[in-house]
Structures are given as structure tokens and as C-alpha cells.
Image (spheres, rainbow, N blue to C red):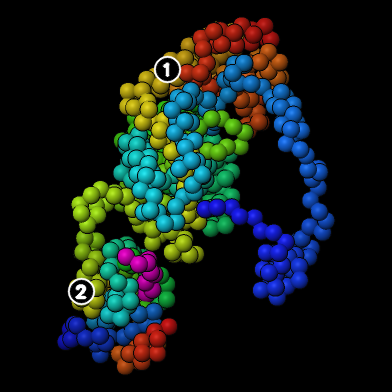
Amino acid sequence: MRYIPSGPGDRKKLLQALGLDRADQLFDSIPKAYRLQRPLDLPPSQAEADLMTHFRELSRKTLDPHDSAVFLGGGAYRHFIPAVVDHLISRAEFYSSYTPYQPEFSQGTLQSIFEFQTLICQLTGLEAANASLYDGASALAEGILLAHRVKRRRRVVVAGCVHPDYLRVARTLTETLGVEIVEAGALEDGAASLKAVEKVLTADVAAVVVQQPNFLGRLEDVAPLAEAAHRAGALCLVVVNEAVSLGLLKAPGAAGADVALGEAQSFGIPVSYGGPYLGFMAVRSEFVRELPGRLVGQARDAQGRTGYVLTLATREQHIRRERATSNICTNQGLCMLAASLFMATLGKEGMRELAVQNRARAEYAKALLSRTPGCRALFSGPSFNEFVLQVPGDATRIHRKLLEKQIVAGLPLAENFPDRKKELLICVTETNSRAQIDRFARELGREL
Amino acid sequence: MKEPNAAFPPNLRYSKEHEWVRVEGSVGIVGITHYAQSELGDVVFVDLPEKGRALTAGQELGTIESVKAVSEVYAPLSGEVLEANESLRDHPEKVNADPYGEGWLIRLKVADTSELEKLLTAEGYQSHVEEGGH
């Protein structure tokens, strides 16, 4: 698709054809009270060279992750990205193209989507995955909507600690349908309490949602929660924030999940403020028609050659309009491709090795930081690459102090949980060297 | 059934949305009409309600997916679902081949037989289709 700007002559012709004098008449149907009655409050245009200088100055105000020690996770994870990933996604055939509306014309794009779906199925232990969603938070909303459609029940129970932003987004996207998201609340050593979940698991519950590892870094025992959900006639939705964990942990499908969904930013997509991110969703095959968004299938042509097609497109909004399975009619094409390339580059062994390294480094940091006087790992149960560190004193203040020394001391939990004032959520990945971890522990000791 | 392949069997009642119902005692058997299946094209999937679901007349009971589109099917009468035609799971093409016979969709326990009066007769439905079917 080319971008061809219109000139004043073109615009005049367009207006004439419409029988209008001015373009702003096009907005007459919007009540005047809701229209901005002045020009946008923007600075005047600048020369390209001046803009470059301006942005260089702005970038100096931000912390360069390569010159600092970043222990921040909480939904966005720093991982090494092999050069081949960016090299290949930067090819014009991929970089500039949108999700195709004449899809079978783009066999290469469809094949890459099919491979992404296959890899997600293998990692989640489920049978069908879609071509990706916007991000993990909207994937959770779509998972809840799926359960709501399948079960015709209006309540959803959240077990343990699910990313608070995900819950906010899910509530926003589902509340007008009458969906009520209930948090079971009580935790046992930072993980979901089966008893607390069972207490709220009534006959009008469509799904039990559990995050693995949970937002506080703790590993959840998914199987008993899935069994409880199934006993109550509900689905079990497993949310994955940190996709690298799938390289090591039992697959959600094997633990009883009906739907696994979440965020795959960890696979080859850099951490940037605000995204882009990459949602994924996989389901048992009986729910394949309830999967939101695009789905690519493998087929054979008349000569018996393998080809790829968009399949079950009759569920989608460009065909089914307001009755569509979801309002998503696109996918995160480029991010999806980056994730596929990342997974293919690492391979099965590499994915496992990456997960093992993350866990090993996080365990080293957990043990070391816990020896800092006054500090302790808040939970004793197993974690993956994140854990909660309790510090003596205001965690937000300590976090700020360490920032001056180019150390990002995780996420102060008080931002989301006002009662957790002395707690930092620390994330350690393969990008954090042992020297960095040692320096973090040393500087933390000095600040206390 | 006397004429399973005729387009408008006289022993059935019809909705304007192209469902048919045949009432035997307190049980209603529901399907889509010959006209509906021919408009839809090859049916590839049928999504039917579970046993025990209470339906009111005019409510969506399920969907039929053809190669062209997914369409809703509405309950012509109120009642509780007694049985869904499970054989359509593996053989959805029966809806095309035999819409008034093996392609039936659900059996329901009719709540109120007087609702039948609101449905079209074969003759009425035939003129509805001939007028464009909308």
C-alpha cells in the first residue's frame, strides 16, 4: 500500500463531490460541545537537524540500560536479542506490511504466522493458538470473554496475584457485558490459596484465572486450581507474563489449563516504554471456534502442494460484523515475527538453557540480597526469575537512592499495593551479570 | 415424514428466520429450512445448545457455519432443550442433504403450544420466501 498525500486541488474536488465547502463540515454530526474549538496546542515545526538535537538531549535524561544494572520486571522483561532477529524483521517485505486482507497472496507471511502458532502450542501444551493479540493484558480480557461465551456465566475468579494492570484492562473490556471479576484475595506464602478460591467458586463462575509465575514471582501449583475450576464447571485460564518461564516450567496445558494466554515480549522484543507488546492465546481444540482474531491453517492446493490459508475467518468482524467472536481482526505481525525468529534461533535446547540461566541467576541474587542485614526474601516457596525482597524501611526511597547509582532496584510494590511499603519486586535475567548482582547487594547494604 | 425432500413440507410450522418446527405431543423438533440451507451453502460446523438450556421463542439457540458465513439460528418456540443432534458434530453436511430429516438441530420440551399459532404455515412460509425471504 502506498501513501499518497492529497494536495489542495484533490481536497477541493473531494469536497465538491460531497457537496461541502469545508472539510470541518464532515464533523458536523459530532455535537459542537465535544469538538475542539481551537488549533492543537503544539510547538511550531522544526528543522530535521534541530529535532535530532532535541531528541538527543531528551535521551540523555533517560537511564541507558547498557550502562546500568536493571533489575526491573513486573510484566516487561529484558532479554538478549540475537542480531539475526532484528536483521530479518527489518527486511522491507516484513517491516512495512500490514496483516494481509488478501492473505493467501502472502504465503510467506502466512507461513511465519503458522509457525508462530505451532511454537506457541508446543510451549503451552495446548492444541490451537491464534496469530497473536495486542498484548498480555488484552489477551486476558479476550480469554475472559471466551469463557463468558462458552460457559454463559458472568463471574470470573482470580486466584493468587495476577498482574494488576492486566486486571484493570480486563475489567475495562468486560464490565459492560456484566462480567464480574472477583479476586479470591488470600495468599499462602505469596501463592494462590486453593481454599480461598473454592470459597468463591460458585455455580455462576465461568473461569478461574491464575498467573504462572504469579505477579509476586511465586510459582503456582496450577493443577489443583484447574481441577477445582473443572469441578465447578468453569474453565481454567493460565496467564503468562514472563514467556521465558515456559522453557522450564510444566506446560499450562499439561497442568490442566483450558486456555493459556499472556505476553510474549520476552521473545525478541525490546523493553520500550509503552510497547509494542505481543499477546498470545492458545486453547484446547474444542474451543478453536472461540479463539479471537486471526488463525492460519495449513492446506494443500489442487496439485497437492502445501500452502497456508486464513482459516475460520467467518468468525471475524470483517465477515460477521457485530456478531464476530471478537473485535480483534488483526495481529501483531512484526512482533509475532520477531518472537518466531527468536524461538527458532534458540531452539528447544536454547529455550530451556535460557530459562535455566534466568532461574539460576535469580536464585543467586535472592540468596545474596537476603544476607544483606535487615533484608529477606519475603516468600520461601519456589520462584522463577522474580522474587519479592523485603527491605528495612521505605522501599520507594531505597529504590530512588539506588537509581542515583545506576541501579534499578526492581519495582516498589507500593505502586500497586499500598500495604507493601517495604517490598521490592526484583527481576534477574540472563542480562544481569554476577558482577552487577554483587554490586547491587553491596550498594543496597550501604543504603540501609 | 411424508415428503422429506420437498421444499415446504405441509406438516411443519415455520419462522420468518427460516427455522421449522414439528410438534409431536409436547416435544418440538427444530431445524432450518431447505431454503435456508441452500442460501447458506455447504455447512461445515453446527454449534448447538447443551441439554437443559431454557430457550424463549426468538432467542438465539446456536449458530450454523457455512463456507460463506456464520449464521444464528433462533428458537421458533419457547422450551427446554431435551437433546441436540450430536451426529451433526461429525456430519454437519446432513443439514444440507436432509434439512427436514437427519439434519434436525434440537428437540425441545415445548412450554406453550399456543405459540405455534404465531408461526407460519407451509403456504405462508412459501410466500414469505417468494417475496424475498426477509
Residue A230 can be seen in this image = no
Task: Tell which of B93 and A10 is nearer to you.
Answer: A10
The residue at the far right in this view is A38
The x, y position of residue A13, in whole percent, is 68, 69
Residue where numbered disc 2 is placed: B97
Which residue is painted at 44% across and 64% down in the image?
A320
Q: Residue lying furthest front in this view?
A: A9
Magenta part of the chain: B67-75
- Seen in the image, is A279 located left or right of residue A346? right
Most foreground residue, A251 or A88: A88
Amino acid bearing label 1:
Gln
Query: Toward which corner of the image does residue B37 lie, by quadrant?
Result: bottom left
Front in this rendered view, residue A366 or A56: A56
Q: Indicate the position of residue B130 as horizontal and vertical percent values.
A: 36, 90
* Gap between marks 2 and 1 measured at Cα: 59 Å
Q: Position of residue B1 (x, y in %)?
A: 17, 84
Q: Residue at x 27, y 87 (%)?
A: B8
Please give the chain letter of the residue carrying mark 2.
Answer: B
Mark 1 crowd level (few <14, some 14–19, many ≥20, 10 Å Cα): some
Badge 2 marks a residue whose secondary structure is: helix
- From this view, report whether residue A109 is shown above or below residue A290: above
Q: Crowding at label 2, few (<14), some or many (≥20) Cα neighbours within 10 Å?
A: some
* Residue under numbered circle 1: A357
